[in-house]
Image (tube, coloured by chain):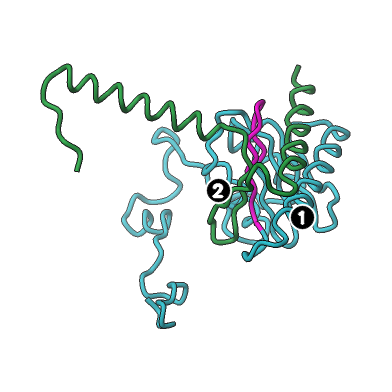
């Protein structure tokens, strides 16, 4: 069974998931440091404070927009990139290398926060040499790669409000 | 629909075009910018002249500089 992701481990896990991440911090709803990866405690605290200010500025800049408050942010700067994602309870921010793929970074951030909120854990892929954890059957494969069911409750509604 | 290239020179030119387009796209993706994503995943650019954009860039630069300082 996979280890349960705790707030203390989330930022560290992000650094393990992506070699492009140079440092990461997790903040709680109050903006306090809840976990760090790739940094000493003091550096992490400073990085966390900057991450908190980043979303403050984002909220200020987008206050007048007719959209929902941003959930994720990507800032490309000359020496690298900053990615951050938030839920009502947590904010996860990462400093990444210059060539980091935005889509992957944002996906990892969102998936980790989802896991923290009780969603399914991120699983690492295994090589064939390591062996599969279960029987090699179609049922097992379907369980490993769940596909959304068409016509389910989560299906988007049409313009007239009817489910697709 | 893209026209199929026939001769070897034409194919090489096509390959070069593809590489050039990829390099251009990568450069464009790394230009300094601020993108925000709503809960549905739709991206929106915070324009360089927009209120707060400069502060956001500055904070992000500080974050990167701090990590660089630790690494060096």
Above-or-below relation of B15 to A132: above
For the stretch drawn in magenta, the main secondary structure is strand
Residue at 54% x, 61% y: name it.
B40
Circle 2 residue: A107
Residue at 40% x, 29% y: name it.
B22
Task: Provide the chain ID for the residue under circle 2.
Answer: A
User: Among the chains, which one is green?
Assistant: B
Residue at 60% x, 49% y: name it.
A2
- Magenta span includes A71: yes
Q: Which quarter of the image is occupied by the N terminus of chain B?
A: top left
Of residues A51 and A42, the one nearer the viewer is A51
Of residues A120 and A18, the one nearer the viewer is A18
- Where does the image place residue A31, in percent across and percent down from the top left? 84, 52
Q: Colour of chain A?
A: cyan
- Where does the image place residue A115, in percent across and percent down from the top left? 63, 55
- Where does the image place residue A9, in percent across and percent down from the top left? 72, 44
Disc marking residue A60: 1
Question: Which quadrant holds residue A153?
Answer: bottom left
Of residues A62 and B15, the one nearer the viewer is A62
> In this image, A43 relative to B3: left or right?
right
> In this image, B16 relative to A132: left or right?
left
């Amino acid at each position: 069974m996979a280890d349960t992701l705790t707030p203390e481990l989330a930022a560290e896990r992000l650094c393990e998931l992506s070699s492009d991440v140079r440092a990461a911090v997790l903040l709680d709803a109050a903006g306090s440091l809840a976990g760090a990866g790739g940094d000493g405690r003091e550096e992490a605290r400073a990085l966390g404070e900057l991450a908190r200010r980043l979303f403050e500025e984002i909220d200020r800049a987008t206050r007048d927009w007719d959209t929902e408050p941003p959930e994720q942010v990507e800032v490309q700067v000359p020496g690298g990139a900053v990615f951050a994602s938030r839920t009502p309870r947590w904010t996860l921010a990462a400093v990444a290398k210059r060539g980091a793929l935005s889509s992957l970074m944002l996906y990892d951030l969102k998936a980790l926060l989802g896991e923290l909120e009780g969603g399914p854990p991120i699983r690492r892929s295994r090589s064939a040499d390591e062996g599969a954890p279960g029987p090699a059957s179609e049922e097992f494969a379907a369980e490993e790669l769940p596909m959304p069911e068409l016509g389910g409750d989560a299906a988007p509604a049409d313009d007239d409000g009817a489910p697709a | 629909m893209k026209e199929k290239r026939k001769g070897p020179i034409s194919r090489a030119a096509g390959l070069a075009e593809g590489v050039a387009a990829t390099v251009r796209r990568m450069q464009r993706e790394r230009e300094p910018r601020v993108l925000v994503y709503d809960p549905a995943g739709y991206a929106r650019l915070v324009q360089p002249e927009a209120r707060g954009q400069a502060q956001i860039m500055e904070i992000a630069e500080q974050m990167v500089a701090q990590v660089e300082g630790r690494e060096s």
